Image (tube, rainbow, N blue to C red):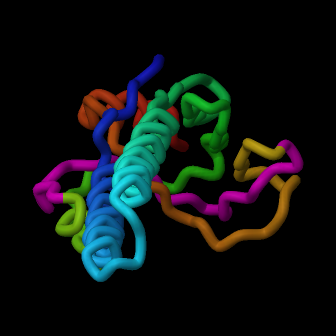
Amino acid sequence: MQFPLTRDDVDSRGFARLLAAFAGVLMILNWLYFMTGGQNLGLAIFASAAIAFWPTSIILLYRYSRRGAVIVDADGLVVRRSFGSMVRMHWGDIEVVRIITLRDAGVYSRLKARVGGVDPDRRVVQIKLRRALRPSLMPTAWVTGANGFPSAIRSLMLDVRSPDEFVEAASDWIS
């Protein structure tokens, strides 16, 4: 079974807002530099266009890279993103799959929700692992198996479009 991830998740909204605020500050500094005589009008307009284009392209690219789906199969869960990155978790390594709100997830999640302008009562799926996720020897994959480099990631939050159906499907496989 395949469950699509939401396109407008908490991370991409917060990242977009922070980058837009940074670009706004750069735009103000650019025009202040123009008004004090540090550059001519043509250069100020070019710099403003570059400052407007740069964060827009990064935000769109980041949002596109966050698209993907969670695949539930007999081996475990696979999270695939649009640029080919993958997270594979075997059923034996998954401790619990549950629905929580961003408010219940902790201070960092509440802060991300506030920065991103997302309701802190938004429901997300939390996956707690028995073994930590490890970056695989393949450059775009993370696994819970024995191969890979050590990390401390033992929990994963996913913004799935239909969290109730996902948790129900995953609960049937967890031992």
Q: Which one is nearer the viewer's eye here, 45 or 29?
A: 45
- Relative to 169, say whether 108 is above or below: below
Q: Which one is nearer the viewer's eye here, 109 or 67?
A: 67
Residue 127 magenta: yes
Q: Looking at the image, can residue 11 be seen?
A: no
Percent coordinates x, y for residue 64 in the rendering: 46, 33
Percent coordinates x, y for residue 78 in the rendering: 59, 34
Q: Quadrant of the C terminus?
A: top right
Q: Which one is nearer the viewer's eye here, 108 or 72?
A: 108
Counting labels gives: 0
Please give the name of the residue rendered at 71% of the width and 49% of the height, measured from the top-left corner: 142
Q: State the residue lying farthest toward the top.
A: 1
Q: Looking at the image, can residue 153 be seen?
A: yes
Percent coordinates x, y for residue 137 in the rendering: 88, 49
Please give the name of the residue rendered at 51% of the width and 41% of the height, measured from the top-left corner: 174
Please give the name of the residue rendered at 28% of the width and 49% of the height, measured from the top-left corner: 124
Is 108 positioned to the left or the right of 73 in the image? left
Residue 2 magenta: no
Is 151 positioned to the left or the right of 73 in the image? right
Q: Quadrant of residue 51?
A: bottom left
Q: Which one is nearer the viewer's eye here, 43 or 119?
A: 43
Q: Quadrant of residue 169?
A: top left
- Relative to 52, say whether 66 is above or below: above
Is 69 positioned to the left or the right of 154 in the image? left
Q: Which residues are magenta?
A: 117-138
Is 174 positioned to the left or the right of 158 in the image? right
Please give the name of the residue rendered at 58% of the width and 32% of the height, measured from the top-left corner: 80
Percent coordinates x, y for residue 42 in the rendering: 39, 53
